[in-house]
Image (cartoon, grey):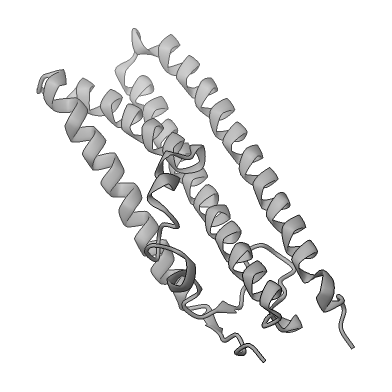
Amino acid sequence: MNDVDPRIYTTVLREMIRHENDLTNHRIMWLLIGQGLIANAYVGLAGGARSVADAMATVGILLTLSTYLILYKSYHARGYLEFLGEAAKTGTLPEPLLPLLGWPARRVKDWRKKVWVCAWLGTPADLLEPYLFLPTVLMQAWTVVLVWRHVPVGLIWTLPLCAFGATALLLVLSVGWVRRQQKDETETLPGPG
C-alpha cells in the first residue's frame, strides 16, 4: 500500500520544488540583509581601527561562504527533484525513492550524469543565477577589501587576483561538496516497464 498515490508523484515533486525555490529566496534575502549589516559596520569602522574593519571583512567572507553552501545544497536539491520528476513522469519512480526532503539521505546513484552538464553544475547559464552569482561577487568584493588593505599591489592587480581567487575557492568548495555527497548515492531506479 502506497503512502502517496503514484499518479500524483509529479504533483508532490512540483510542490517540493516550489518549497526549495522559496527556501532559496529566503536564503538569498538572509545573505543580502546580513551583508548589508556587515557592510554598514565596515564602512563605519574603516576609518578607525584597522583590525576591527578587517574583522568585519572576514565576517563578510564567512557569512558568504556559509550562505553559499546552503544555497548550493538547495540548488542540487532542486536538480534532484527535477530528475525524480522525470522518473515519475515515465512511471519508474518507486515510492521508497519519493523523498520527504528536497535533499534526502538516500539518493539515486549518478543522477547528475543523466541531467546535468557536469557533476557540480546543471547548465552554464546557472552561473548567472542569483543563488550562485551573488555569493561569488560578494566573496570577490570582501577579498578585495582585505587584500587591498594589506598587500602593496595596485588595484589593477588586486581586482583580477581576488576575482580569480574567490571564484576558485567557491569552485573547489563546490566540487568537494559534490564528491562528499556522491558517497550517499546508492539507490537505483528501475527501468521502464
* Quadrant location of the N terminus in the rendered image: bottom right
Q: Is residue 14 left or right of residue 121?
A: right
Taking 5 as reference, is 76 above or below it? above
Q: Is residue 192 left or right of residue 127?
A: right
Total labels drawn: 0
Q: Residue at x 49, y 23 (%)?
A: 38
Residue at the extreme left:
153
Q: Is residue 151 visible?
A: no
Taking 70 as reference, is 112 above or below it? below
Q: Position of residue 18 (x, y in %)?
A: 72, 50
Taking 183 as reference, is 124 above or below it? above
Q: Position of residue 161 (x, y in %)?
A: 17, 34
* Quadrant location of the C terminus in the rendered image: bottom right
Residue at the extreme top:
47
Q: Nearer the viewer, residue 52 or 9?
A: 9
Q: Is residue 149 visible?
A: yes
Specify the quadrant of the image occupied by residue 94: bottom right
Specify the quadrant of the image occupied by residue 56: top left
Q: Nearer the viewer, residue 35 or 45?
A: 35
Taking 15 as reference, is 54 above or below it? above
Q: Nearer the viewer, residue 9 or 134?
A: 9
Q: Position of residue 155 (x, y in %)?
A: 16, 19
Q: Position of residue 58 (x, y in %)?
A: 38, 33
Q: Residue at x 42, y 12 (%)?
A: 43
Q: Residue at x 22, y 21 (%)?
A: 149
Q: Is residue 157 left or right of residue 89?
A: left
Q: Residue at x 81, y 78 (%)?
A: 6
